[in-house]
Image: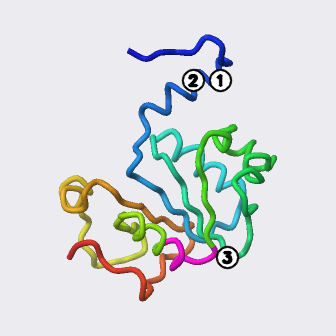
């Protein structure tokens, strides 16, 4: 049974109920976004899917650095339909820095891209989730370019 605190606002009560369904061991990573409106949309969708955190690799400073500044940014507030207020978003300058942080905290990075041809698609539940202890960061990139391979990125499975 869920206890709802009647002293909280109705919006805070809804956020508290939604928090119960969030997955603590799934982090979405957005690499090099170019449009703050699209970032807000990603925040809204990540929140709706129950992902607890969004990490953004932003070397071009498209979004503010601090979470507080992001929460008060009018573009992010409007395009995320206020989901930025209760969604945890962390910014990194480089992909390597983000991957190091994920690895240090026991996450395995899983990368998806529609641009790699000749690779076998594997359904997450069938391919890797049982092998990685249920903690992983899902990395996506803007629609127009593929995620670039790096020395830091190693395949979670073969």
Gap in Å between the C-alphas at discs 1 and 2? 5 Å
Q: What stretch is highlighted in magenta?
A: 93-98
Who comes first in sequence, dot 3 or dot 1? 1
Q: Is residue 118 above or below residue 28?
A: below
Q: What element carries label 1?
A: helix
Q: Residue at the location (41% across, 61% down)?
A: 137
Asked if 91 appears above or below 117 in the picture, the reply is above
Q: Does 108 sit left or right of 82 as displayed?
A: left
Q: Where is residue 94 in the image (x, y as percent from the top left)?
A: 59, 78
Q: Is 103 on the left or on the right of 134, as rendered?
A: right
The residue pinned by badge 1 equals: 11
* Magenta-drawn stretch, dominant element (helix, strand or loop): helix
Disc sitting over residue 14 in the figure:
2
Q: Name the residue under label 3.
A: 59
Which of these two is toward me, 138 or 103?
103
- Residue 151 falls inside the magenta stretch: no
Residue 84: x %, y % from top left: 66, 44
């Amino acid at each position: 049974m869920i206890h709802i605190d009647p002293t909280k606002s109705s919006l805070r009560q809804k956020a508290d109920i939604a928090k119960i369904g969030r997955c603590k061991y799934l982090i979405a990573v957005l690499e090099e976004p170019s449009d703050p409106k699209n970032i807000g949309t990603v925040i809204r969708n990540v929140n709706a899917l129950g992902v607890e955190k969004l990490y953004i690799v932003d070397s071009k400073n498209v979004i503010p650095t601090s979470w507080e500044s992001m929460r008060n940014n009018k573009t992010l507030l409007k395009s995320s339909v206020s989901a930025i207020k209760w969604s945890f978003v962390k910014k990194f300058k480089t992909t390597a820095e983000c991957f190091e942080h994920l690895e240090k905290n026991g996450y395995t990075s899983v990368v998806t891209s529609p641009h790699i041809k000749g690779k076998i698609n594997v359904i997450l539940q069938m391919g890797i989730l049982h092998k990685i202890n249920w903690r992983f960061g899902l990395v996506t990139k803007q629609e127009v370019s593929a995620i670039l391979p790096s020395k830091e990125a190693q395949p979670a499975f073969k």
